[in-house]
Structures are given as structure tokens and as C-alpha cells.
Amino acid sequence: MQKGYTLFWLLPALIALVIYPIVTNNVMLRETVFLILLSITLSISLNIILGFTGYVSFGHIVYYGIGAYFAFYLMYAYKVSLIVSIVLGGLVSAAIAFVLGQAVLSLRGAIFAIATIGVNEAVKSLINNISILGGAMGLYFDFSIYDNYGGALKAIWLSYYLMGILTILSVIAAYYIKKSKFGLGLFSIREDQDASAVLGIKTKLYKSLAYATSAFFPAIAGGIFAFKAGNIEPSGAFNLVKSIEMIVMVMLGGYGSVAGSALGALFYEKIKSILLVMPYVKDLHLAVSGLILLIIVQFAPSGIVGFLTKYFKNLRKVLE
């Protein structure tokens, strides 16, 4: 694949975004940027299976929830450190996604999308009925757990630092996957899976690996968010609304593009923040998300990046 320059501007931009609230010590800005970083991580991750491979996963939030619950329970019940807990949560979610991918990725199109919703709802229902995980009420930290991190205030900053690092790592990973032989195989599957198999690409293995990778980063993000919040419950951890928002972010930016996923998340969070403070539409942001997705699919299927590169061809190397 042709060498591009996406990381040369995207990484410095992300680092500057992460550092700005730290330098200014602005708590409100920190919270805003934290949500942006979370959205970028989720969008970048979903793009690996949706944009690179062509599988629209409507229930991808299930891995965010699994990782969040696994990490939270380790910290809650066994006092395992935050770093170890979230990494293990990511690995467990990736392993589950790889095994599950052997079955669900044999499905295609709308059937696959519906199956992923079913998986999310099944896991959510299961968690609801496991008493040691708090059932429908979830679990809550005793604030003494934050003593090992210098107190609750420092723990919040730690969560912010970790989310910043995770976002940067997810962008780097997605970019190098795209530029690799593995990524080329994923794109060939997206274009014509049957032809790819004829050419010798191990489509089942490639798809499962992509699915597992796309589950790893959301799972860690879920663990970080749960640690920061101090509580977790099934309705929040496995919220299908978040899955729909992830798809909107990928499509808004441009599916298949790493830079597009990041830009789509940034723009969507900005749109959402505006809608939430408008009195007449603050409870309708999901409907607005659906409308945005409909408009994108109908009039700009390649998203922001596709629109820009269509008219400014020199931008292709920097908006991969």
C-alpha cells in the first residue's frame, strides 16, 4: 500500500488534545476531552471490523461491557490493580470475540447485524441475573479503593491519562493494521469475500482476528470508565444506543479511514454536546443520530474524508 502521512498530524493533534486540560488544570475541559477520547477509541476500534472488513456490528458495545465488568469485578472483589484489571479485561473480551467470531462471522449483512444485537442482549440479560455481579443494580466501589491511587481526585486524573494513552495506542494499532498485509487481506474481504478465499486468504481467521482486535480497545475503555465512575450496571455497560453512536461516528468520518474515525468521533461529540443543551431536542439526540446516519448513507456514503478527498485529491495521503 502507498505510504501515507496520517500519523504525522493525527498523533500530535491527539497528544495536544490530551495535554491541554492537564496544562490548564481545567476540570470541565478534562471531562469534555475524556468523552471525546472515549468516543475516538470506540470509533477507531469499530472501524477495524466495520470499515476494514465490511461487517456492521450493531452490538459491538457488548465488548465494552464485558471488559468493564471483568475489570471492575477484579478491583471490587480481589483488589487487583487498575492496570492489570483493565488489560485482563481487554484480553478476555478479545478472546471471547475471537471464539464468538468463528460462529457469527459466517453470517453476512443484516443477519450478522441482528446477531450482534442478540449477543449483546443475551450477555446483558445474563449479567442481570448473576447475583455476585450485583444483578440489575450493578456494583459500587467503596471509596477507600481509591486510597491506593492517592484518593478519588487523583484517581480521576489517572483515568484521564489512561484514556489518553489508550486512544493514542488504538490509533497507532489501527493505522498499522491498515497498512499491513493483514489489513490488505481485510480490505479484500470487504470488497469480495468469496474472491478473497479463492485467492488463498484465510478469510475466517482474518475476520476473527479483526473482530478480536476491535473488541480489545473498547473493553479497556470500559474498564477505565467504570473505575472513574465508581459503579457499573448492565443498562449502562451494554447500552445499544452507544453501539448506534459508534456506527454513526465511523460513517460520519468515513468508514475504512483511521483519520475519518477520529474526526467522525470528534464531530459527533460536538454535535451531541450542542443538542444536549438545546431544550427542545435534548431528549432526541438518538433520533438525530439516526437522521445523521440516514443522510450520510444517502448523500455522503464515504463520510467527511470521502467528501474531502473527492475534491482535494492531495489530501488522500493525510486522511487515510
Image (cartoon, rainbow, N blue to C red):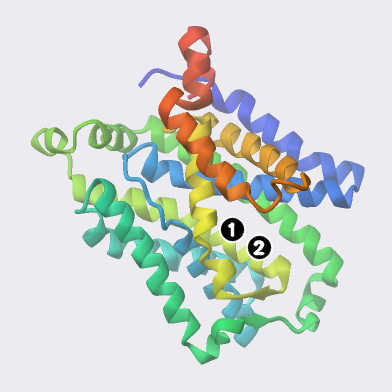
* Residue 256 point in image, percent of width and height: 41, 32
Residue for badge 2: 225
Amino acid carrying label 2: it is Phe
With 159 as the anchor, is 91 left or right in this view? left
Rendered image: mark on residue 24? none
Question: How packed is label 2: few (under 14 Cα within 10 Å), some, or many (20 or more)?
Answer: many
The answer to whether mark 2 and mark 1 are in CB contact below 8 A is yes
Number of numbered discs on residues: 2
The answer to whether residue 257 is seen in the rendering is: no
Rendering quarter of residue 233: bottom right
Residue for badge 1: 221
Mark 2 → mark 1, Cα distance in angstroms? 6 Å
Which residue is at the far left?
198
* Residue 65 point in image, percent of width and height: 51, 67
Residue positioned 61% across, 87% down in the render: 77
With 208 as the anchor, is 285 left or right in this view? right
With 87 as the anchor, is 119 left or right in this view? left
Which residue is at the far bottom?
131
Q: Nearer the viewer, residue 209 or 303?
A: 303
Query: Disc 1 on helix, strand or loop?
Result: helix
* Residue 22 point in image, percent of width and height: 85, 46
Residue positioned 72% across, 81% down in the render: 141
Residue positioned 63% across, 82% down in the render: 139
Q: Which of 269 and 31 is in front in this view?
A: 269
